[in-house]
Amino acid sequence: MTTETPTAAPFQGGLVVRSGSRVLKDRIATVLVYLAFALAMVPLIWIMWTVVANGWDLLLSAGWWTHSQRNILPEQVGGGAYHAIYGTVVQAIICAVIAVPLGVFTAIYLVEYGRGRLARVVSFMVDILTGIPSIVAALFIYAVWVTTFGFHRVAFAVSLSLVLLMIPVVVRSTEEMLKLVPNELREASYALGVPKWKTIAQIVVPTALGGIVTGIMLGLARVMGETAPLLILGPYAAGIATDLFNGPMAALPTLIRENFGQPDPASQARMWASALTLILIVLVLNIAGRFVARFSGVKK
Amino acid sequence: MAQRIDVKDLNIYYGAFKAVEGVSMAVEARSVTAFIGPSGCGKSTVLRTLNRMHEVIPGARVEGVVEMSGRNLYGKDVDPVAVRRTIGMVFQRPNPFPTMSIADNVAAGLRLNGERNKKRLAESVERSLRGANLWNEVKDRLDKPGAGLSGGQQQRLCIARAIAVEPQVLLMDEPCSALDPISTLAIEDLIEELKANFTIVIVTHNMQQAARVSDKTAFFNLAATGKPGKLIEMGETTKIFSNPVEKATEDYISGRFG
């Protein structure tokens, strides 16, 4: 007697059947995703093209990086943007000197110490600060600096209002980076008998340093382009001004505005060149931020 | 070096939840004590209370007494940071500091506690790495990142880091659970050597490991999920694995549950 081994038919179960509608949906989705990407790129490339095409020449001209606009008439070709670059960079640095410690320490509080009600209130306040329009921050500083204390509109007041805009950026980015540090590292440090504050200073922050620095650079890049605080608090000066507490000081956004709406080609060229300069500075900061992130902190 | 630990009537809470109830035990100096039991029975929790790592978790608290050579570690004037300097810990997953080199990782405990003398630090690094059976593998690349080592080497680096601060007791929380058999063997050999100088408590899910490395074994169990874990039985490892008193212990070690 032979036992019949049933010869199974080769498995067909839907392996070769192509679902026409699924393939179609896949195609449509792919096309839509690429289309959205292309659409998003259009304004970016357009802006870059316009600014570079109109501003490039002046950037290469003698004196753009070394001279100011002192004694240069609107219709006159010449002068440079040194005064405005100086103003923008210095105001941003002063802002960072105040905002970075405040922001980083707030983030450390929120991640490492904050429990319960106070932490929730602080976090909520940072959220509110994130949503404040730059002109409101500028008006607030105006109300304090000029109306209440009776000081003049000066570069330092501009920096103060930039601080309000930079703090939430620094807090949020630092917070995210500190949260990424694994708890195991904190525990490893505690288990060696290292106190909490030293664990934070020597283990947690160094591990997150790259990301924290990147966040700070991005925050700086953002405040450098802020215009509202300058319009309210930072009157333009055509010459080089270095006094933060006295007299007007130029900045790149106000240099752009100064040359905007002038009929003559010399002013228009200056406007585009200033815009390109501002973009370049922000770009350099961004690249520097990424560079620092790569070479600091965690060893690979 | 090496001191005994006595635990009396220990209750451990996470907030309102009672995780462990009524643990009393004696951990002998210069011996290996293994904690075994099913997941969630509180053996890691008990381990973490021995060097006050437990209270790092918000809401966690402890009732009862943990004495090291007669001194209550939960006394009012006792600094938890000082306790952890005396009772070191090795964790489940190797966790070298990613910003530091191999040498800096080992020196971290001393350096962060204020030791500045380069010569003494270098001596400690070599002594600790030798003690952790890692020196020959890494002596030519001490300045390379610790995170670049293999998993087993990283775990031995963490053991070197823990013994560099010269603790009395070394707690190990499933130190081999993330390692392959070869690395596990290396760690088990190391535990055997470390026993000469340290009091070692090891939590393990691997019963063969407990049988291989430990002198005494403590079996923890819990009645049901949500109920507190309890110490069921503790004794000589050979006795626990051959002739346990409690039925639950026998069921667990013979693989009937857990």
Image (cartoon, coloured by chain):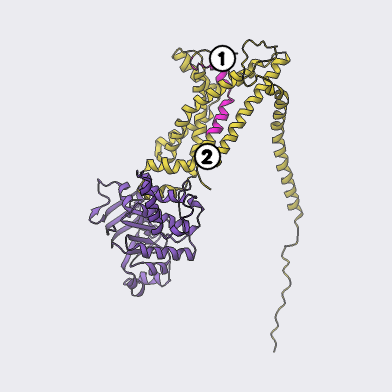
For the residues bearing labels 1 and 2, Cβ distance under 8 angstroms:
no
Count every numbered label the image shows and give the total.
2
- Residue at 35% of width from left, 62% of height from top? B194
**Amino acid at pointer 2:** Gly
Between B121 and A18, the one lying in front of the other is: B121
Q: Is residue B234 left or right of residue A256?
A: left
Q: Which mark is residue B141?
A: none
User: In the rendered image of this protein, which colour is used for chain A?
Assistant: yellow
- The residue under label 2 is A211
- The residue under label 1 is A235
The span shown in magenta is A216-245
Sequence order check, earlier mark of 1 and 2: 2
Q: SS of the residue at dot 1?
A: loop
Image quarter where the C terminus of chain B lies is bottom left
Q: SS of the residue at dot 2?
A: helix
Between B244 and B216, the one lying in front of the other is: B216
Res. B15 visible in picture: no
Gap between marks 1 and 2 measured at Cα:
35 Å
Q: Are marks 1 and 2 on the same chain?
A: yes
Image quarter where the N terminus of chain B lies is bottom left
Q: Position of residue B89 (x, y in %)?
A: 37, 54
Q: Is residue A10 left or right of residue B31?
A: right
Is residue A127 depicted above or below B1 in this figure?
above
* Chain that bears disc 1: A
Is residue B122 depicted above or below B205 in this figure?
above
Q: Is residue B192 magenta?
A: no
Q: Which chain is purple?
A: B
**Amino acid at pointer 1:** Pro
Q: Position of residue B103 (x, y in %)?
A: 44, 50
Dividing the picture into quadrants, the one containing residue A231 is top right
* Chain that bears disc 2: A
